[in-house]
Amino acid sequence: MIAMHVTPLIDPAHRERFAWLAAGDDGRPLGTAFLWLPAAGHTADVQITVHPAERRQGVGTRLLEALTGAAAEHGIRALLTEPVRPGEDGFCRARGFREVLALTYTRLALKDAEPVAEPVPGYRLAHWEGAVPAELADTFVQARSAMDDMPMGDTAYVTLAWDVTRLHAVAEAVAKRGETLCTTAAITPDGTMAGFTELVVPAEGAGDAQHYGTGVLPAHRGRGLARWMKAAQISRVRANFPRLDGLLADTADSNTAMRRTNGSLGYVPTHRSLLYQRDLPA
């Protein structure tokens, strides 16, 4: 153990995010920790980073203690993290985290993309950027439940309650970052939404865009809607954002249907990752 102090940091622009800085007595930075409170449920995302030269000296443990205390004060019952640096998985296991979900990350190179998908009879596609159009807002709220049963392994996943206000808040948050939220939806003849897929384009309109989610309501599954929506969205973003290089997606290994859909459209695996969860006392 080395002499250190841990200082909580405040970012007024992100009140749902808590941060801590660990520093030595001489003022040198040792590591950081972040805690993101969920909009709903009792599972919070966390990230701890320690400078390579300062590892194995108790820095990560002190940071974990700080964020765990804050999480408990806010009613959090589980911490979720995704190790990305060598050795972080060992740190997680040694401090009570367990593997709960395996993820595969994929990328579609747009210059090579040739998405082809036959339209699904009985449906039409709708596209928009930013906030959902007023005439589709209520049915989009209902369609959000299509994500409720997505495979999430052993994570303490809690489904979110959606309303029109929440839909607009998400679109506004993306817009404030300077990014563009692109949505494609499948609509039935009576005007209700059967499914949707979302993509966020970087502020500069270049580089790689990130998929946010794709869902089809149970009554409409097995007809190829997910593939049709994603293929149409790929073609649309290629035309509207010609500087984009690729599209990124991360999918649970247990979500075989979506992995199969992405693979058929040309998405190529880039790497795999594991999510770890630590349960907190009730």
Image: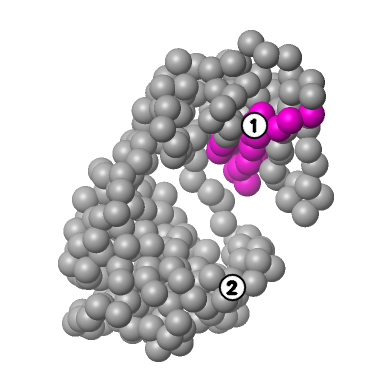
Q: Is residue 12 left or right of residue 49?
A: right
User: Residue 267, how many percent across, how many down?
Assistant: 26, 64
- The disc, 1 or 2, on the residue closer to the chain's N-terminal end is 1
Q: Is residue 147 left or right of residue 2?
A: left
Magenta-colored span: 27-47
User: Residue 227, how many percent across, how many down?
Assistant: 25, 70
Residue matched to label 1 = 31
The residue lying toward the viewer, choosing from 128 and 220, is 128
Q: Residues within 10 Å of mark 2 (few under 14, many from 20)?
A: some
When asked about the image quadrant of residue 197, the answer is bottom left
Residue 198 position (above or below residue 37): below
- Measuring 45% from the left and 82% from the top, which residue is drawn there? 243
User: Residue 257, how many percent across, how many down?
Assistant: 22, 55
Q: Residue furthest bottom?
A: 239
Q: Please state which amino acid type lies under the numbered disc 1.
A: Gly
In reply to whether residue 44 is colored magenta, the answer given is: yes
Res 122 seen here? yes
Quarter of the image containing the C terminus? top right
Q: Main secondary structure of the magenta part?
A: strand
Residue matched to label 2 = 203
The residue lying toward the viewer, choosing from 243 and 15, is 243
